[in-house]
Image (cartoon, grey):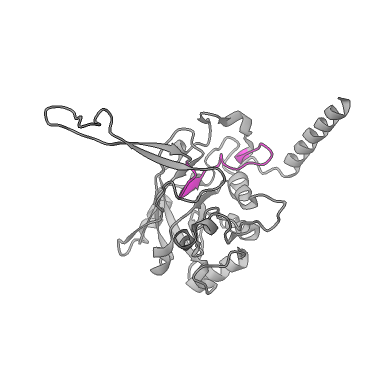
Amino acid sequence: MFYIKFLALCLLLSSHVFAQENKWWPSKWGAEDTLGSFNMLGPELTLKATKLVKTGKTYRLGIETNNKTPAFGTRTFEVTILQPNQYGGGSYGDNKFNYFDDYMAGWMGVGSQIDGLGHAGTDGVFYNGFKGKDFGKVDGLTSMGVEDYPPIVTRGVLIDMAACMGHKIVPVTTVFNRQNIMDCEKQQGISIERGDVVLLHSGWINMLETDPDTFGEVEPGIGSDGAKYLVEKEILAVGSDSWGLEIWPGEDPKIFDPVHQMLLNQNGIYILENMDTRELAADKGYEFMFVLGPARISGAVQMIINPIAIR
Protein backbone atom coordinates (compact mmCIF):
# COMPACT_ATOMS: atom_id res chain seq x y z
CA MET A 1 0.00 0.00 0.00
CA PHE A 2 2.85 2.35 0.90
CA TYR A 3 4.51 1.65 -2.45
CA ILE A 4 1.31 2.44 -4.36
CA LYS A 5 0.87 5.74 -2.49
CA PHE A 6 4.53 6.60 -3.07
CA LEU A 7 4.22 5.85 -6.79
CA ALA A 8 1.07 7.98 -7.06
CA LEU A 9 2.86 10.87 -5.33
CA CYS A 10 5.81 10.54 -7.72
CA LEU A 11 3.49 10.64 -10.72
CA LEU A 12 1.71 13.70 -9.33
CA LEU A 13 4.99 15.51 -8.70
CA SER A 14 6.37 14.61 -12.14
CA SER A 15 3.19 15.93 -13.79
CA HIS A 16 3.53 19.17 -11.81
CA VAL A 17 7.18 19.55 -12.79
CA PHE A 18 6.32 18.83 -16.46
CA ALA A 19 3.62 21.50 -16.44
CA GLN A 20 5.90 24.09 -14.85
CA GLU A 21 8.84 23.39 -17.14
CA ASN A 22 6.63 23.59 -20.23
CA LYS A 23 4.36 26.40 -19.05
CA TRP A 24 2.59 28.18 -21.94
CA TRP A 25 0.38 30.51 -19.90
CA PRO A 26 -0.69 33.20 -19.19
CA SER A 27 -1.72 34.00 -22.75
CA LYS A 28 -0.52 37.19 -24.42
CA TRP A 29 -4.20 38.15 -24.44
CA GLY A 30 -4.33 38.10 -20.62
CA ALA A 31 -4.63 35.55 -17.82
CA GLU A 32 -8.45 35.31 -18.08
CA ASP A 33 -8.66 35.12 -21.87
CA THR A 34 -10.68 32.31 -23.47
CA LEU A 35 -10.71 33.41 -27.14
CA GLY A 36 -7.06 33.15 -28.17
CA SER A 37 -6.39 34.32 -31.72
CA PHE A 38 -10.03 35.37 -32.18
CA ASN A 39 -9.10 38.48 -30.18
CA MET A 40 -7.65 39.82 -33.43
CA LEU A 41 -11.04 39.81 -35.17
CA GLY A 42 -12.79 43.10 -35.78
CA PRO A 43 -13.17 46.01 -38.22
CA GLU A 44 -9.47 46.13 -39.20
CA LEU A 45 -9.31 42.52 -40.43
CA THR A 46 -12.80 42.73 -41.95
CA LEU A 47 -12.00 45.83 -44.03
CA LYS A 48 -8.69 44.32 -45.11
CA ALA A 49 -10.54 41.22 -46.32
CA THR A 50 -13.17 43.18 -48.25
CA LYS A 51 -10.45 44.65 -50.47
CA LEU A 52 -9.71 41.15 -51.80
CA VAL A 53 -13.18 40.80 -53.35
CA LYS A 54 -12.72 41.47 -57.08
CA THR A 55 -15.01 39.06 -58.96
CA GLY A 56 -17.75 38.28 -56.43
CA LYS A 57 -17.22 34.53 -56.92
CA THR A 58 -18.03 32.46 -53.85
CA TYR A 59 -16.70 29.07 -52.76
CA ARG A 60 -18.19 26.77 -50.16
CA LEU A 61 -15.41 25.06 -48.23
CA GLY A 62 -17.50 22.50 -46.36
CA ILE A 63 -18.03 18.91 -47.48
CA GLU A 64 -21.31 17.01 -47.20
CA THR A 65 -21.78 15.38 -43.80
CA ASN A 66 -23.70 12.13 -43.49
CA ASN A 67 -23.52 8.63 -42.01
CA LYS A 68 -20.84 7.62 -44.51
CA THR A 69 -18.45 10.50 -43.78
CA PRO A 70 -15.12 9.13 -42.46
CA ALA A 71 -14.56 10.36 -38.92
CA PHE A 72 -11.89 10.10 -36.26
CA GLY A 73 -12.16 7.38 -33.62
CA THR A 74 -15.67 6.48 -32.52
CA ARG A 75 -17.41 9.53 -33.98
CA THR A 76 -20.65 8.91 -35.86
CA PHE A 77 -23.40 10.98 -37.47
CA GLU A 78 -27.03 10.13 -38.26
CA VAL A 79 -30.05 12.16 -39.41
CA THR A 80 -33.60 10.85 -38.97
CA ILE A 81 -36.53 12.46 -40.82
CA LEU A 82 -39.89 12.57 -39.02
CA GLN A 83 -43.45 13.64 -39.83
CA PRO A 84 -44.95 14.17 -36.36
CA ASN A 85 -48.57 12.99 -36.09
CA GLN A 86 -48.97 12.88 -39.86
CA TYR A 87 -48.32 9.28 -40.75
CA GLY A 88 -51.10 7.32 -42.39
CA GLY A 89 -52.43 10.38 -44.19
CA GLY A 90 -52.64 12.76 -41.23
CA SER A 91 -52.31 16.53 -41.62
CA TYR A 92 -53.04 19.80 -39.81
CA GLY A 93 -55.93 22.23 -40.34
CA ASP A 94 -58.53 22.52 -43.05
CA ASN A 95 -55.71 23.34 -45.49
CA LYS A 96 -54.16 19.87 -44.92
CA PHE A 97 -50.77 21.26 -43.89
CA ASN A 98 -47.82 18.83 -43.70
CA TYR A 99 -44.25 19.22 -42.53
CA PHE A 100 -41.05 17.23 -42.02
CA ASP A 101 -38.68 17.62 -39.08
CA ASP A 102 -35.19 16.25 -38.71
CA TYR A 103 -33.47 14.73 -35.71
CA MET A 104 -29.67 14.56 -35.54
CA ALA A 105 -27.72 12.11 -33.40
CA GLY A 106 -23.98 12.45 -33.75
CA TRP A 107 -20.74 14.21 -32.99
CA MET A 108 -19.87 17.83 -33.77
CA GLY A 109 -16.45 16.70 -34.98
CA VAL A 110 -17.62 14.96 -38.17
CA GLY A 111 -17.05 16.30 -41.67
CA SER A 112 -15.88 19.90 -42.10
CA GLN A 113 -15.28 21.21 -38.59
CA ILE A 114 -13.64 23.79 -36.39
CA ASP A 115 -11.66 22.64 -33.35
CA GLY A 116 -12.04 25.03 -30.43
CA LEU A 117 -9.57 25.83 -27.67
CA GLY A 118 -11.30 23.42 -25.29
CA HIS A 119 -10.43 20.50 -27.57
CA ALA A 120 -6.72 19.86 -26.85
CA GLY A 121 -4.86 19.83 -23.55
CA THR A 122 -1.67 18.63 -21.92
CA ASP A 123 -1.88 16.55 -18.76
CA GLY A 124 -5.27 18.09 -17.92
CA VAL A 125 -4.23 21.68 -18.63
CA PHE A 126 -5.78 23.50 -21.60
CA TYR A 127 -5.42 26.90 -23.27
CA ASN A 128 -4.19 29.68 -20.98
CA GLY A 129 -3.62 27.28 -18.08
CA PHE A 130 -7.29 26.42 -17.53
CA LYS A 131 -7.76 22.96 -16.07
CA GLY A 132 -10.10 20.59 -17.85
CA LYS A 133 -11.68 19.42 -14.60
CA ASP A 134 -12.88 22.96 -13.94
CA PHE A 135 -14.62 23.72 -17.24
CA GLY A 136 -15.20 20.37 -18.99
CA LYS A 137 -18.67 19.26 -17.93
CA VAL A 138 -20.68 16.35 -19.36
CA ASP A 139 -23.45 18.70 -20.55
CA GLY A 140 -21.08 21.19 -22.17
CA LEU A 141 -17.99 23.30 -21.62
CA THR A 142 -18.50 26.16 -19.20
CA SER A 143 -15.70 28.09 -20.92
CA MET A 144 -14.30 28.27 -24.47
CA GLY A 145 -17.50 26.93 -26.04
CA VAL A 146 -18.45 27.64 -29.66
CA GLU A 147 -21.27 29.94 -28.56
CA ASP A 148 -18.75 32.63 -27.60
CA TYR A 149 -17.03 32.91 -30.99
CA PRO A 150 -17.27 36.34 -32.63
CA PRO A 151 -18.16 36.67 -36.34
CA ILE A 152 -15.13 35.39 -38.25
CA VAL A 153 -14.25 37.60 -41.23
CA THR A 154 -10.63 37.94 -42.30
CA ARG A 155 -8.13 37.41 -45.09
CA GLY A 156 -7.86 33.81 -46.22
CA VAL A 157 -4.75 32.36 -47.84
CA LEU A 158 -4.54 29.10 -49.79
CA ILE A 159 -1.19 27.33 -49.79
CA ASP A 160 -1.42 24.81 -52.63
CA MET A 161 1.10 22.26 -51.42
CA ALA A 162 0.01 19.76 -54.08
CA ALA A 163 0.83 22.13 -56.96
CA CYS A 164 4.01 23.43 -55.34
CA MET A 165 5.27 19.88 -54.80
CA GLY A 166 4.23 18.70 -58.25
CA HIS A 167 1.43 16.31 -57.27
CA LYS A 168 -2.30 16.03 -57.78
CA ILE A 169 -2.46 14.28 -54.40
CA VAL A 170 0.50 14.69 -52.05
CA PRO A 171 1.95 11.29 -50.98
CA VAL A 172 0.76 10.15 -47.58
CA THR A 173 4.17 10.29 -45.89
CA THR A 174 4.73 13.96 -46.80
CA VAL A 175 5.35 16.36 -43.92
CA PHE A 176 4.78 20.08 -44.52
CA ASN A 177 7.62 21.87 -42.76
CA ARG A 178 8.59 25.53 -42.49
CA GLN A 179 10.66 25.56 -45.68
CA ASN A 180 7.95 23.80 -47.71
CA ILE A 181 5.39 26.44 -46.75
CA MET A 182 7.78 29.33 -47.35
CA ASP A 183 8.75 27.95 -50.74
CA CYS A 184 5.09 27.64 -51.72
CA GLU A 185 4.39 31.22 -50.60
CA LYS A 186 7.20 32.42 -52.84
CA GLN A 187 6.07 30.28 -55.77
CA GLN A 188 2.50 31.60 -55.49
CA GLY A 189 3.62 35.22 -55.00
CA ILE A 190 1.85 35.70 -51.66
CA SER A 191 2.81 36.08 -48.02
CA ILE A 192 1.10 34.79 -44.89
CA GLU A 193 0.21 37.71 -42.63
CA ARG A 194 -0.95 38.31 -39.08
CA GLY A 195 -4.62 37.46 -38.59
CA ASP A 196 -4.92 35.22 -41.66
CA VAL A 197 -6.82 31.97 -41.98
CA VAL A 198 -4.36 29.66 -43.76
CA LEU A 199 -5.69 26.68 -45.75
CA LEU A 200 -3.31 23.94 -46.91
CA HIS A 201 -4.34 22.11 -50.09
CA SER A 202 -2.81 18.64 -50.48
CA GLY A 203 -5.38 17.06 -52.80
CA TRP A 204 -6.12 14.51 -50.06
CA ILE A 205 -9.81 15.46 -50.14
CA ASN A 206 -10.07 13.57 -53.45
CA MET A 207 -9.57 10.34 -51.51
CA LEU A 208 -13.06 10.78 -50.06
CA GLU A 209 -14.41 9.76 -53.46
CA THR A 210 -11.76 7.31 -54.67
CA ASP A 211 -10.69 5.58 -51.42
CA PRO A 212 -12.68 6.75 -48.35
CA ASP A 213 -11.23 4.05 -46.09
CA THR A 214 -7.68 5.22 -46.73
CA PHE A 215 -8.76 8.86 -46.43
CA GLY A 216 -9.68 8.43 -42.78
CA GLU A 217 -6.76 6.23 -41.74
CA VAL A 218 -3.65 8.15 -42.80
CA GLU A 219 -2.81 11.56 -44.28
CA PRO A 220 -0.04 13.91 -45.34
CA GLY A 221 0.03 17.07 -43.27
CA ILE A 222 1.77 19.76 -41.37
CA GLY A 223 4.55 18.82 -38.97
CA SER A 224 5.76 20.53 -35.81
CA ASP A 225 8.27 22.68 -37.69
CA GLY A 226 5.59 23.94 -40.07
CA ALA A 227 3.23 24.62 -37.18
CA LYS A 228 5.92 26.66 -35.39
CA TYR A 229 6.29 28.79 -38.49
CA LEU A 230 2.54 29.55 -38.56
CA VAL A 231 2.60 30.37 -34.84
CA GLU A 232 5.39 32.87 -35.51
CA LYS A 233 3.28 34.43 -38.29
CA GLU A 234 0.47 35.01 -35.72
CA ILE A 235 -2.28 33.52 -37.84
CA LEU A 236 -5.92 33.29 -36.76
CA ALA A 237 -6.53 29.67 -37.80
CA VAL A 238 -5.11 26.94 -40.02
CA GLY A 239 -7.01 24.31 -41.95
CA SER A 240 -6.49 21.60 -44.52
CA ASP A 241 -8.30 19.34 -46.96
CA SER A 242 -7.59 16.34 -44.71
CA TRP A 243 -9.37 14.96 -41.66
CA GLY A 244 -6.77 15.82 -39.02
CA LEU A 245 -4.53 18.65 -40.38
CA GLU A 246 -1.26 17.16 -39.16
CA ILE A 247 0.79 14.29 -40.60
CA TRP A 248 -0.65 10.94 -39.58
CA PRO A 249 0.89 8.69 -38.38
CA GLY A 250 2.95 11.34 -36.65
CA GLU A 251 6.64 12.14 -36.97
CA ASP A 252 7.35 10.53 -33.58
CA PRO A 253 5.23 7.45 -32.72
CA LYS A 254 5.53 8.29 -29.01
CA ILE A 255 4.03 11.78 -29.43
CA PHE A 256 0.26 12.07 -30.05
CA ASP A 257 -1.11 15.06 -32.03
CA PRO A 258 1.71 17.53 -31.24
CA VAL A 259 0.43 20.06 -33.79
CA HIS A 260 -3.00 20.16 -32.15
CA GLN A 261 -1.24 20.69 -28.82
CA MET A 262 0.98 23.45 -30.17
CA LEU A 263 -1.76 25.37 -31.99
CA LEU A 264 -4.85 25.01 -29.79
CA ASN A 265 -3.42 24.30 -26.36
CA GLN A 266 -0.30 26.43 -26.27
CA ASN A 267 -1.03 29.28 -28.70
CA GLY A 268 -4.81 29.67 -28.99
CA ILE A 269 -4.84 29.15 -32.77
CA TYR A 270 -7.93 27.40 -34.16
CA ILE A 271 -7.95 24.36 -36.47
CA LEU A 272 -10.21 23.72 -39.48
CA GLU A 273 -10.47 20.18 -40.84
CA ASN A 274 -11.91 18.60 -43.99
CA MET A 275 -11.90 21.85 -45.94
CA ASP A 276 -12.85 21.38 -49.60
CA THR A 277 -10.20 23.54 -51.24
CA ARG A 278 -10.37 21.97 -54.71
CA GLU A 279 -12.24 24.73 -56.49
CA LEU A 280 -10.07 27.44 -54.93
CA ALA A 281 -6.94 25.56 -55.97
CA ALA A 282 -8.24 25.08 -59.53
CA ASP A 283 -8.87 28.84 -59.80
CA LYS A 284 -5.50 29.69 -58.19
CA GLY A 285 -7.47 31.54 -55.52
CA TYR A 286 -4.55 32.17 -53.23
CA GLU A 287 -6.11 35.20 -51.48
CA PHE A 288 -9.75 35.63 -50.54
CA MET A 289 -12.21 36.93 -48.00
CA PHE A 290 -12.91 34.20 -45.44
CA VAL A 291 -16.31 34.21 -43.71
CA LEU A 292 -17.57 31.86 -40.99
CA GLY A 293 -20.31 31.97 -38.36
CA PRO A 294 -20.51 28.60 -36.57
CA ALA A 295 -23.79 27.48 -34.99
CA ARG A 296 -23.94 28.81 -31.43
CA ILE A 297 -24.54 25.55 -29.60
CA SER A 298 -23.79 26.21 -25.94
CA GLY A 299 -20.79 24.38 -24.56
CA ALA A 300 -19.78 22.71 -27.82
CA VAL A 301 -16.11 21.81 -28.19
CA GLN A 302 -16.17 21.52 -31.99
CA MET A 303 -18.68 22.41 -34.69
CA ILE A 304 -19.63 21.22 -38.17
CA ILE A 305 -19.06 24.19 -40.48
CA ASN A 306 -19.32 25.41 -44.06
CA PRO A 307 -17.01 28.44 -44.37
CA ILE A 308 -17.30 30.67 -47.43
CA ALA A 309 -14.42 32.06 -49.48
CA ILE A 310 -15.18 35.16 -51.59
CA ARG A 311 -12.91 36.48 -54.35
Q: Is residue 257 left or right of residue 211?
A: right
Residue at the limit of the structure toward the right, as seen here: 2
Task: Judge whether 161 appears above or below 249 on screen.
Answer: below
Q: Is residue 122 above or below residue 89?
A: below
Name the main secondary structure of what is drawn in magenta.
loop
Visible in this render: residue 35?
yes
Residue 89, image x, y percentages: 20, 32
Front residue (pair 26, 270): 270
What segment is highlighted magenta in the picture?
108-128
Camera-side residue of 309 and 206: 206
Name of the residue lying farthest toward the front: 88
The quadrant in which residue 128 appears is top right
On screen, residue 22 above or below 147: below
State whether residue 111 is above or below residue 247.
above
Q: Position of residue 75 (x, y in %)?
A: 52, 43
Q: Residue at x 65, y 37 (%)?
A: 125
Instruction: Answer with left or right where residue 276 lies relative to residue 186.
Output: left
Q: Residue furthest top?
A: 1
Q: How many marks?
A: 0
Q: Quadrant of the C terminus?
A: bottom left
Choose between 29 and 84: the one closer to the eye: 84
Is residue 284 among what the camera can see? no
